[in-house]
Image (spheres, rainbow, N blue to C red):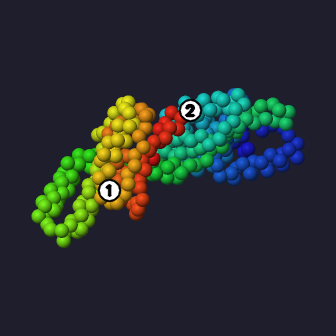
Amino acid sequence: MNGLDRSRGTQGPAMARTDRLFETIANYTYDWESWLGSDGELQWVNPAVERMTGYSQEDCLKLPGYPLPLVHPDDREKLAGLLAAAREGGSGNDVAFRIVRKDGGIVWGAISWQPVHDKAGQRLGVRTSVRDITERKQAEDAVTDALAEAERANLAKSKFLAAASHDLRQPLQAASWFLAAIEREAGPARADLLASLRHCLDSTEDLLATLLDISRLDAGVVHPEVTGFAAADLLEAVEMEFSSAAAEQGHELRVVLSSAFLRSDPILLRRIIENLVSNALRYTRQGRVLLGARRRGSKLWIE
């Protein structure tokens, strides 16, 4: 192909026209196309190589070890193995690697490869096609960086909340003490108002405690301590904690004890169940709240 093809031999007019047609199509293909012989030597490369690498077709045909000198040093071993497998008849698609341009710049390509045979089935070498994926890689890197930054910000937030838990709880505890003093001095006329205020304060403390528990777990400050214990002990403790509150709200809290034994962190698990029962009582208009456990295989479902 005008000095850029090492394989042309004697051929008839019909074959020459077919070759010219294929040559025209190949030369105007946007991707960087190459034909490597069975010995690994470059036989032909299309003009797109210069757009992607800065090296001309002539440069490539003179380049020992093509295409590895155009590949980033950290990716050469991967490409060399890929091309060796291709010469043994293997094929593949869309393997990303870095290209070192003639001007020193770095771009990304994705290579596809397949063996080439003549009509008699004789292996002629390997065809490779490289597509420029620089923009795609830049977009992927931007997403990765954004996710990493979000994770760093989230961890910083969690560490801050974990470290500030005492300072955040202190104003609520003071407000609770002040409210208790007011409750002792106030008359019946203010009882409903103070009860509503107490309910709001307790709800805020519950939400804050839950937020801080989650933040401490996220920050790695709290590590679950898994141990074995009786489910009945846990359920009974929750019943004792909430039975009075349920009665004050006009609800019945019924807890069905279980003979099962669990392996979990008893403190964290109790906190989860307390939140569950607290929400059930808070959003139940009338009737009762039932807390129980069911065996399902090797697990125990608490509902």
Left or right: 171 as drawn, with respect to 257: left
Label 1 Cα neighbours within 10 Å, binned few <14 / some 14-19 / many ≥20: few
> Is residue 83 in view?
yes
Question: Mark number for residue 24?
Answer: none
Q: Residue, x 50% and y 38% (percent of image)?
A: 295
Please tell me whether mark 2 sits on a helix, a strand or a loop. helix
Q: Residues within 10 Å of mark 2 (few under 14, many from 20)?
A: few
Residue 82 screen position, x and y as percent: 62, 32
The correct choice, above or below, for 180 with respect to 75 in the image is below
Q: Where is mark 1, residue-wise?
A: 247
Q: Residue at x 41, y 62 (%)?
A: 286
Element class at badge 1: helix
For image coordinates 42% across by 59% down, the residue present is 287
Q: Identify which residue, 100 or 62, lies in the foreground.
A: 100
Q: Which residue is mark 2?
A: 78
Residue type at mark 1? Answer: Ala
- Percent position of residue 299, x then y: 49, 36
For the residue pair 28 and 167, the one nearer the viewer reads as: 167
Residue type, label 2: Lys
115 above or below 303?
above
Which residue sits at x=56%, y=41%? 96
Front residue of 77/180: it is 180
Q: Earlier in the sequence, mark 2 or mark 1?
A: 2
Give the x, y percent position of residue 283: 39, 60
Q: Picture coordinates of residue 117 (x, y %)?
A: 79, 35
For the N terminus, give its image quadrant.
top right
